[in-house]
Image: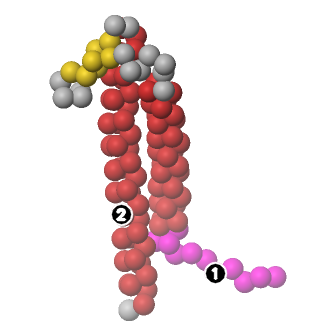
Amino acid sequence: MPNHRRRSAAEQNLFIAVWFTLGISGGCAFYTSCVIQSTLDTLSSSQAMALIIVDAGKNFASDDSKLGDKLNDATAALHNTCDVAYAVAVGCVIIAGALLWKMIRDRL
């Protein structure tokens, strides 16, 4: 019979936190890939070049109102994707810091 070491409450909480954060990170990564694919599909439209860029690239106008709306939505989606990417990066830095703190503390 193998001898399993019982985890302390702190180790168990850290284990749960890491898995929870990884789940959120995975969800954010999936969301990001879906948004990027949607944006690429919109920008690869055959009518994508028939537009006018207004407000320093913040808004698009086109002779096709649906295309202008799609490009404005794509721009907003890219901004949201950027925010999600920053959130994932901050979460990863926090996890790395917590794990390093635990490693250093356990060595002392």
* Dot 1 amino acid type: Arg
Q: Residues within 10 Å of mark 1 (few under 14, many from 20)?
A: few
Q: Nearer the viewer, mark 1 or mark 2?
A: 2
x, y percent for residue 79: 32, 36
x, y percent for residue 96: 40, 69
Q: Main secondary structure of the magenta part?
A: loop
Residue 100 is covered by the magenta coloring: no
**Residue under the point 57% across and 75% down:** 7
What is the secondary structure assignment of the residue under circle 2? helix
Label 1, on which residue?
Answer: 5
What is the secondary structure assignment of the residue under circle 1? loop
**The C terminus appears in which quarter of the rendering?**
bottom left
| Residue 74 drawn above or below residue 8 | above
**Residue under the point 18% across and 24% down:** 55
Q: Could you tell which of marks 1 and 2 lies nearer the N-terminus?
A: 1
x, y percent for residue 63: 34, 7
- Measure how far apart labels 1 and 2 are at the Cα level: 27 Å
Q: Nearer the viewer, residue 92 or 85?
A: 85
| Residue 46 drawn above or below residue 58 | above
**The N terminus appears in which quarter of the rendering?**
bottom right
Q: Nearer the viewer, residue 105 or 86?
A: 86
Magenta-drawn segment: 1-12
Residue 31 seen in the current view: no
Task: Determine the residue located farthest toward the left in the rendered image.
Answer: 55
Instruction: Give the number of the disc on residue 45.
Output: none
**Residue under the point 25% across and 22% down:** 53
Q: Residues within 10 Å of mark 2 (few under 14, many from 20)?
A: few
Which color mode does the image show? secondary structure
* Dot 2 amino acid type: Ile
